[in-house]
Image: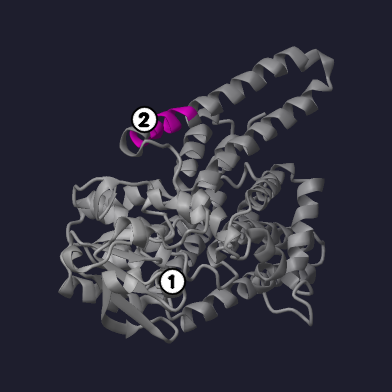
Amino acid sequence: MTVAAGGPSAPRLIWAALLLAGLFPLWCALGQGFDLNDDAYITLTYAKSLAAGRGFVFNHPPATFGTTTPLLALAVGALAALLRGAPADTLAVWLTALAWIAVGWILFLFRRAWGLGDASGLVVALAALFGGWRGPLGVLGSEAFLFHALLALTLSLHLVGRDFAAGLTAGALFLTRGEGVLALGVIGASALGQWLVAARRATVRNRGAAALARRLGWSALGFGAVFALWALYAYATFGQVLPATLAAKRAQVALGWPTFAGELMTSWWRAWGVPALGHPLLSPWWALVGVGVVVAFRSRRQWLLWLLWLGAYAGGYAALGVAGYWWYQVPIFLSLQLFFALGLVAVFESLRAARSEKLRLAGMTVAALGLASSLLPSARAVATYQGDWRASSYRALAAWFRAHARPTERVAFHEVGYLGFYSEQRIVDLCGLTTPETLPHFARRDLTWPVRALSPEWYVASPTWDLLPALRADAWFDQAYRRVAVLPAPGGGELQIFQRIPRENAAPP
């Protein structure tokens, strides 16, 4: 069964409210600034190279697949090529702020498909635009909001029966992050569920089976078209279709990094929503999330798509056993925020339906207060956000190499985003994301292999990734490298810069 999307017939006041609310993500973009997370600059280094016509390389050939989000790299690279002189990080921040705005607009434009009226659709859209958590700061410029916009569009297109289009956007979602493929499973499970309900009536079973096959076929065809195009390009360019990041993240867990499941269960969820009384779960935000989930089961079954997605995403990441990078929680929170909005809608609609004028006024007041409480944590975060705490140190490191090293000389370091983006160096990534030949050794905990085997012209020792004791274990390192500079490290300590001694004067490893 298909559901019509919401049309452009909403009152002008609602459209004005949507436009006004869209200023908040733009304000967040200003507050975020351009001291982005180091990992974001890995993707943007690829975008910079694409814009310069060098191809999908990390400053220098060969091409490597070291970003989890090729679609963002391609989009920012294309924009940077069109808008000559515009920095890739600036473009990325504003592009992803627009994607954040698009989440709210998509949900409102498809409000009928989600079982919402004009006023209720506005409440959900505003909840999506207001954030409700400090997490939005730090992920603008990365793929988080582009992913969520495409996810909302994929699920909405599925609800209105646009199966081929839903498959296409699911393909784009996969190129935004690999877990986007789960959306194809979610819409497939939804179509199957609808068929099972219809199949209880024997008279429509055969016809329903044919319709199910068509729906699944069109969705798979749309996804397959995007995947096939990317696979042809990626295999010809990198010799692989999937990025190297999954292996690196799993290897990091083997080295003792916290897991996704561990971080989710112990710390992340405590920062979501609004202040609570005593325990993090004792907050109006969590209460309304619970109400929204109940409403989804009882009367708005289409919202179970979000619950399926949450289970697939969290379960998939937990099963893979990857490291718990803090931004991996963002898709979970943004989806729960929609259940908060649905809970708010349920309270708002029940009060608005009352005969008493006072109760109807109370419903509007509850909706306004709920949205304001959701807005407050993000607004506070904008006012206090200082950018990535490593930014000034890593920019200084990149500036040092621009002044003292040739671009063709290789620099070995463990956090390569700022260094790659703000310099033109060849980079040896000690964690293996952009230097894939390192990954097998990284997985075996042979962390010094890139320096020993690749002999880069430069090595940067950091107090947060200190390999010097291991490198100096058999004395070869001090015979092959000399320390030439010291710079302040993020959070204190020193970044020690070592230069390789000419081979005729150095002992081999």
**237 to 349, vertically: above or below:** above
Q: Which mark sits nearer the N-terminus, 2 or 1? A: 2
The residue at 59%/31% (across/down) is: 161
What's the residue type where badge 2 is placed? Leu
Locate the N terminus and report the quarter of the image it occupies: top right
Q: Is residue 108 above or below residue 172?
A: below
Image side of residue 387 versus residue 392, left or right? right
* Residue 132 location (% of width, % of height): 60, 70
Q: Please name which of the two marks, 2 or 1, marks the residue nearer to the observer.
A: 1
Residue 105 visible in the displayed image: no
Q: Quadrant of residue 331?
A: bottom right
Instruction: Measure how far apart labels 2 and 1 are at the Cα level.
Output: 45 Å
Q: Is residue 231 magenta?
A: yes
Residue at 56%, 73% in the rendered image: 134
Are the residues flagged by discs 2 and 1 in contact, CB closer than 8 Å? Answer: no
Residue that badge 2 annotates: 232
- Say few, some or many: other residues with alpha carbon within 10 Å of mark 1 (under 14 / 14 to 19 / 20 or more): few
Span highlighted in magenta in the image: 224-234
Which secondary structure, mark 1? loop
Would you place residue 260 above or below residue 301 in this image? Answer: below
Q: Is residue 359 left or right of residue 400?
A: right
Q: Secondary structure under badge 2?
A: helix
Q: Main secondary structure of the magenta part?
A: helix
Q: Nearer the viewer, residue 321 or 460?
A: 460
Judging by the rendered image, the residue that carries numbered circle 1 is: 473
Does the stretch in magenta take in 378?
A: no
Mark 2 surroundings within 10 Å by alpha-carbon count, few (fewer than 14), some (14 through 19), many (20 or more) = few
Expressed as whole percent of the image width and height from the top left, the position of residue 158 reads 59, 35
Tell me where residue 257 appears, x and y as whole percent: 59, 65
What type is the residue that disc 1 sits on? Ala
The residue located at (78%, 81%) in the rendering is 277
